[in-house]
Amino acid sequence: MLSVEIIEEFEQYFAKMVPVAEAIGRECYLPEEKAAEYLAGLVSLSERYHLPFAPDLAILKAQMYQYTPDLGEKEKTGGKYDRKKKKQYLLNLLQQAKAYADDYFAGTRRLLEESSILLRKVAAVASAKGLAPGAGIEQLIEKMKQDEELFPALTSAIGTVGYSNMKCLLLRAVAEVTE
């Protein structure tokens, strides 16, 4: 299972897509260079974590340079129309790149959300029992393992998302509950 931090790193990278898309939409110089730079970073990030959609992103990047306008429309050829079609093509490639990642992360996100809800409830119970205040996350987990009510929920979360993701989600849940 992917870690929460990896998914969040991709989400932060996708937040950078908005300015790139806006730059492509405006009359910018060489929009394919902006899109290619963005996709190159996305390919690099995907390769760093050995994600299976990295080759698909690399193919999208290659397709970006192979764009040719539709020559079947004789009456609508011209500089402005061709640039508009090329920009739309580039935006579609960026959208497709995001769709690859979203499809891959969808199942993990669902499991993380389910576990996050469970761990918020666990954190609330732990806080009501006086286990959460002042304890580090490791001490809190040890105290929860000792508790008959909290242990099954804790093991369920570990089984669903893994120990490191559970620890990260529990830390966030404790912060939400104690504030």
Image (tube, rainbow, N blue to C red):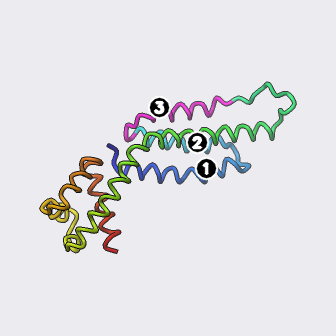
Tell me the SS state at disc 1.
helix
Residue holding disc 3 = 55
The image quadrant where one finds the N terminus is: top left
Range drawn in magenta? 48-67
> Which badge, 3 or 2, is on the more N-terminal residue?
3
Asked whether residue 63 is drawn in magenta, I would say yes
Disc number placed over residue 113 in the picture, else none:
none
With 170 as the anchor, is 46 left or right in this view? right
Residue receiving disc 1: 20
Where residue 39 appears, as percent x and y from the top left, is 54, 41
Q: Residue 72 falls in which quadrant of the image?
A: top right
Residue type at mark 2 is: Leu
Q: What residue type is labelled 3?
A: Pro
Upstream in sequence: badge 2 or badge 1: 1
Q: Nearer the viewer, residue 176 or 82?
A: 176
Q: Distance between the residues labelled 3 and 1?
A: 22 Å
Of residue 12 and residue 138, the one placed in the foreground of this image is: 138
Quarter of the figure with residue 136: bottom left
Where residue 102 appears, as percent x and y from the top left, is 48, 43
Question: Circle 2: is it few (<14), some (14-19), or many (20+) Cα within 10 Å?
Answer: many
Cβ–Cβ under 8 Å for marks 2 and 1: yes
Q: Which residue lies furthest to the left in this view?
A: 146
Q: Which of 105 and 33 is in front in this view?
A: 105
Q: Residue at x 26, y 48 (%)?
A: 162
**Residue 86 x/y as whole percent:** 71, 37
> Please, which residue is most extreme toward the right here?
75
Left-right relation of 67 to 178: right
Q: Position of residue 150 (x, y in %)?
A: 20, 61
